Amino acid sequence: MPESVVDPVDTVTEVPVAVVGAGPAGLMLAHRLGRAGVAAVAVDLRTREEIATTHRAGILEADAARDLVETGVSDRILREGHEHEGTELRFGGRAHRIDFRALVGASVWLYPQTEVFTDLADARERDGGTVHFGVRDTEVLDAATDRPRVRFTAADGTRHELRARYVVGADGSRSTCRGLVPEALRTRYGTEYPFAWFGVLVRAPASAPELVYAHSEHGFALISQRTESVQRMYFQCGPDERTEDWPDERIWETLQARVAGADGFRLAEGPVLERSVLRFRSFVQEPMRWGSLLLAGDAAHTVPPTGARGLNLALHDVKVLAGVLLRALGGEGEAALADYQPLALRRIWRAQHFSSWMTRLLHTAPGATPFELRRQLGELDSVVATRAGRAYLAEQYTGWPTAA
Ligand code: DHB
């Protein structure tokens, strides 16, 4: 009996590329393919509203910002984003500026991931790309063959099947696509951290013109910005911390203690609009391709948020992947796909190292000995006290050139 009789679908769509996950990675991939005349249909379990209101990172490499403009997604970043030519490391109660422009001739853009997503979702709509948000029961079938399919129930209850040549798993850090790669063929590398971030959005004026990454004996804090009147801040907390236990006063007391110093620096306070606990880890799954399935972004690798590599890395993956898929579909076939992992992976492992290094540099492990705290201060001092140290941080933070 044909399978369609057993499990009928209402709509069958033939499309070169099906993308599972319509976050920034999935949508940017679909956008890049669409520009080259190759259709891609993206599906996501979350509604558009859910993705647009889930606060994530805020820093884009200059190359990623330029790509948004030059590929025609949107130029809103140029008007509403803020170019930052440096950042501040705070430790021992003092500020130390890392001048990206002077050190490595580079900058980054403060432009929240939620805005990147909104620009991409608007661009897909404008360009006539199909994106199904709020789907259920997504299933990838026959990924090992050259006729993979994606089945799902759309938000209106209709059953769909995408018949594709390639399926891309861009379904985030809790990816189900990566689990399709047979256990015997995959390797997972990773490490956990004994802390998390408590993230807040607050209504207050900015406390600093650039980001402040603060180390203190009480733990890490990050002071970021959003708008003139709304700011984003994070502080290190236990992985099992509950937001209910953190009234505004306790949050401000904690943040102030972590940035306090002889220079009298104080944060401008205001009501806390939103709070959440972000757990994190370092993770990579290899291979990034199995049969007709390719993994991109957080689905293949996650980094801790320190250093803001996650979104940038995902955007780099799909830049490389779009090129490889266009070559494969343009006649080169399978052979082109072999280039994806080596090109993507070099940057992935650099970013794994940098994110993990910056996390360990700035956070206080529970039970850290006085020796460990002083060693950390020695490491921080060796970063800021020499041009080579500052340039290292600046170079890693502002990103690396795109893999060819
Ligand atoms: C932001 C988040 C980060 O993880 C980071 O390293 C820098 C900025 C942010 O949300 O603004």
Image (cartoon, grey):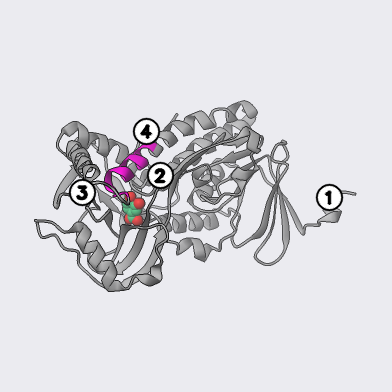
Circle 4 SS class: loop
Which of the marked residues, 4 or 3, is nearer the chain's N terminus? 3
Task: Work out how far the residue at label 4 is from the one at label 2, CA to CA, in angstroms.
Answer: 12 Å
Q: Are marks 2 and 3 in contact (CB under 8 Å)?
A: no
Q: Nearer the viewer, residue 18 or 349?
A: 349
Marks 1 and 2, Cα distance to the nearest angstrom?
A: 41 Å
- Secondary-structure class at tag 1: helix
> Does the Cβ of the disc 3 residue fall within 8 Å of ligand 1?
no
Q: Is mark 4 within 8 Å of ligand 1?
A: no
Q: Which mark is residue 3?
A: 1
Of label 2 and label 3, which has the lower sequence position?
3
Tell me the amino acid under the disc marked 1.
Glu
Amino acid of disc 3:
Glu
- Residue 312's disc number: 2
Residue 101: horizontal and vertical position, in percent?
Answer: 21, 40
Which of pointers 4 and 1 indicates the residue nearer the eye? 1
Q: Nearer the viewer, residue 214 or 62?
A: 214
The stretch drawn in magenta includes residue 358: yes
Q: Looking at the rendered structure, which numbered label has been put on residue 88?
A: 3
Magenta span covers which residues? 353-365
Say the numbered circle drawn on residue 396: none
* Kind of residue at badge 4: Pro
Give the crowd class for mark 2: few <14, some 14-19, many >=20 residues within 10 Å: many
